[in-house]
Amino acid sequence: MYDFHLHSNFSMDSKTSMDAMVLSAIANNLRSICFTDHIDLESTEKKIDFLFRTDDYFKEIKRVKYKHLGKIEILGGVEIGMQPHLKEKYELLLEQNPFDFVIMSIHSIAKKSIAIDNIFQEMPIEQIYKIYFNEMYEAVKLFDNYDVLGHMDYIDRYILNPLDIPNYDRYYEIISEILKIIIKKGKGIEVNTAGMRRGLDYFNPKPSILELYKDLGGEILTIGSDAHSAEHIGYNYRLAEKLIKDLGFKYIYIFKERKKFPIKI
Ligand SMILES: [Zn+2]
Ligand SMILES: [Zn+2]
């Protein structure tokens, strides 16, 4: 098993040490894990940066890597919260830091955090979704320094009543355009299993989006639990792998030093 989306206490929303995460990963027989702690610049309406000191991060990754050498492979990635106006800032950050793997996620729209600010009280859900996918489209057009687009329909997790989630068909055109750009630029998308422990009955993105990705010629997929605590490492990995296989994909991918490696499933 391979978990390529994990948070430790280098992220503002996790209290779990890297050591505790690694011990759980070993106990759950994971072969390879990649920490992808959050760097979310200007994340909220108040422009709060959620970040960590990358020197300390790489030092800690190196320490746990050697401590558990031979038992598990440990890699150091990052999950960046992209907003189109932050392109240059992220370019600089990634130029200066040798991450193994970069997930680009959309956590904020219209300069407000989806999880923290009150966007759902300010606009109708359909409009929020429109802005969400428009900004995602801008991000994949503008920015190339990432490996996979994270949890594509993550916004679904924040709709209180799942029945209010707008039908995927309404956004079919823009989702297709986003996926076409990703494929053309040689990037991938991730299957994020956290959707199922966050009130949804699917992973993010939902199977219809994965199907569309496949139909458009997409091949690069990673699997990540988005665990913020030790018990969620590798969460529903086998189910995700089965879903991917059933959809006709032959490989999942892992990344090291920003290079991709296929794993037959
Ligand atoms: Zn995320
Ligand atoms: Zn995450």
Image (cartoon, rainbow, N blue to C red):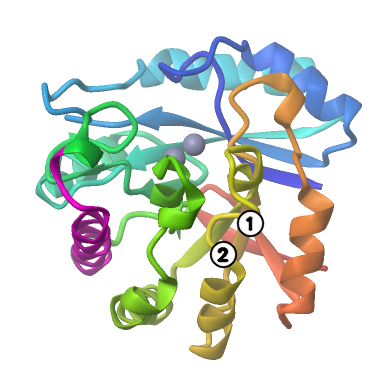
Pointer 1 local density, CA inside 10 Å: few below 14, some 14–19, many at least 20: some
Q: Which mark is residue 17?
A: none
**Residue 185 drawn above or below residue 74:** below
- Circle 1: residue type: Tyr
Give the x, y percent position of residue 82.
26, 46
Give the x, y percent position of residue 71.
87, 29
Task: Measure how far apart labels 2 and 1 are at the Cα level.
Answer: 6 Å
Give the x, y percent position of residue 76.
55, 33
Residue 60's image quarter? Answer: top right
**Residue 172 drawn above or below residue 111:** below
Q: Give yes or no for contact between labels 2 and 1 (Cβ–Cβ under 8 Å).
A: yes
Residue 181's image quarter? Answer: bottom left
User: Which is more toward the observer, 163 or 88?
Assistant: 163
Residue 5: in magenta span: no
**Residue pointed to by mark 2:** 206
User: Which is more toward the observer, 12 or 4?
Assistant: 12
Q: Start and end of the magenta stretch?
A: 122-141
Residue at x 20%, y 58% (from the top left corner): 135
Image quadrant of ligand 1 equals top left
Residue at x 58%, y 38% (from the top left corner): 198
User: Which is more toward the observer, 172 or 185?
Assistant: 172
